[in-house]
Image (cartoon, rainbow, N blue to C red):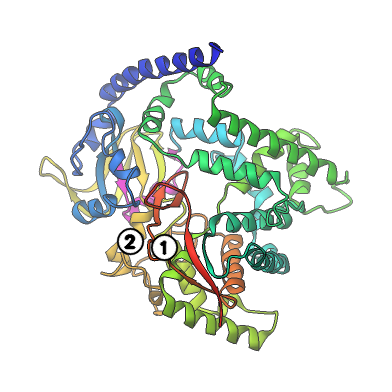
Amino acid sequence: MQDIPMSVEFVAACLLALAIISWVARILSPAQKLSNCIPGPKSPSWTYGNLIDLLLTKEYGEHEFKWQETYGPVYSIKACFGESRLMISDPLTAKFILHNHLFAHGASQQKAVNSLFGSGNIFLARGDYHRHLRSILNPSFSSQSVRRMLPMFKDIGAKLVDRWESLGYPGTTVDITQTLHDASLDLISEAIFEHPFNSLTGQSDMASIQRTLIDTVSSVSKFSQLVDACLPYIPDFIFNFSLRLPIPAIRVLQEYRKATNELGRQLIQQTPSRDASSEKDETFIGLLNKTNAAATTMTDEKVGVHIRTILMAGDDTTILYRLAKAPAFQQALREEIQLAGANGGDNIEYDNMPLLNALINETLRLYPALPFAERVAEQDCVLPLSRPITTTTGIQITEMPIQKGQATYVAIASYNRLTSLWGPDAGEFRPSRWLEEQPCKGSAIGPHASLLSFLAGPAVLLEMQVLVTEIVPKFVLTLPPDDSAKPCFGLTLVPRTADGVQQIPIHIEHVA
């Protein structure tokens, strides 16, 4: 019984020592000298810097969006132990960072991502290996492949409606997040893995494990910020040892990895051995096997890495909340859906439904799943700026030299609210802006609709289109009088109520 506290105390002592080492290393780092001259908000704490105001607010962006208004699209904030980081929403600068080999994920982010997904994941892959993984994943997520999934998507949407009916949701106020997560898992499992999870029927162990893991990793605290600051200085053998400790959060991660590795084994067994020269296998597992350079087949652990990557890609629960908050728009959308169904039967042209796509685009704009992306300069370089900056020493600069090791945040949520791009009402939820000829007044740098909302791929867009068109004609969604749900930072942006519970309570009634 004494092993657990001793192990935890050992790791805590290591973290404390490494915090001191981290501070000394940051103070001596030349990468900090230049960013210290860039204006930004005053740091309320040497220990946590501005991170509490950035990450641990009742609503994400409570301070960040005001900082952008005050200091512009490029400014400096403090992280733990006095480290300076650059917050960047300038379109020119953000594009340079995101599409340049000079920038990579930070050391702490790399360790955290590898511990969650496993080594060899696409999030950290670079160069030839990244292109290799893309050749495996892209066929399953191309627009053409996703369109072939439409009947499956519609079937899952119908099952979600049936699930709400069987649970007695109509006439009550309920948290809709669990059933929406289950629908997303069923879509992924059937469309990509060709292996049903049956999450909506309540028969899926994977859905339960996934839900527990998301709740665990979505918990952000002051202590987690200190751990993040220390991770780059923790030797790999200590970090790997900590992942074996009998701590509840680590046990959840271990169970999740074990379950997804077992799923990988099942998928491999279900995929018949094929001669790649005689038969073309375009299934997810078939492509993994065929393009693997090291062996003719992949191990369950390697498959598990890619399974976890896809399962954690996310789904959107915010869109129904926004609909519940806008009854007039909801009714107009209901009429659009009914008209599209009446004219086209089962062959609804989702891309030709302006109100539906305006709703999706506006939700993605104001509530991106990933509100910022951290990148670190691997070499000295010069950042381009779309507008000059006056430093704290009074010098005006039109480009920004930074040194190796400089940490940056590409502020996606802030970029999506730039008044220079989206107009003076950029902070307002107004779907009608997407009915205008030019909703974004600048060049596109994002993968969809000029947005830097990274998870807006074809599969996610079609999922949102289908689920909305299945739900809205059958149910009226409204917010309860005591609504307090706000987007907060977790692993991604997640909805939380005032009491800290991750949920979205919505009142549901049948359409009259």
User: Which percent across, then down, holds residue 168?
Assistant: 62, 65
User: Which percent across, then down, holds residue 226?
Assistant: 36, 28
**Which numbered disc, 2 or 1, marks the residue that appears first in the sequence?**
1
Q: In this rendering, is residue 27 above or below 357?
A: above
Residue at 64% from the left image edge and 88% from the top image edge: 343
| Residue 381 magenta-highlighted | no
What amino acid type should be assigned to the residue bearing mark 1?
Answer: Arg
Q: Bounds of the magenta span? A: 86-104
Give the quarter of the image for residue 295. Answer: top right
The numbered mark at residue 365 is 1
What amino acid type should be assigned to the residue bearing mark 2?
Answer: Arg
Q: Name the side, left or right, on which 466 lies relative to 440.
A: right
Given residues 375 and 325, the one toward you in this image is 325
User: Which percent across, then down, holds residue 114?
Assistant: 56, 33
Q: In this rendering, is residue 169 above or below 379?
A: below
Q: Name the side, left or right, on which 194 lies relative to 230.
A: right
Badges 2 and 1: C-beta atoms under 8 Å apart?
A: yes
Q: How many marks?
A: 2
Quarter of the figure with the C terminus: bottom right
Residue at 37% from the left image edge and 33% from the top image edge: 225
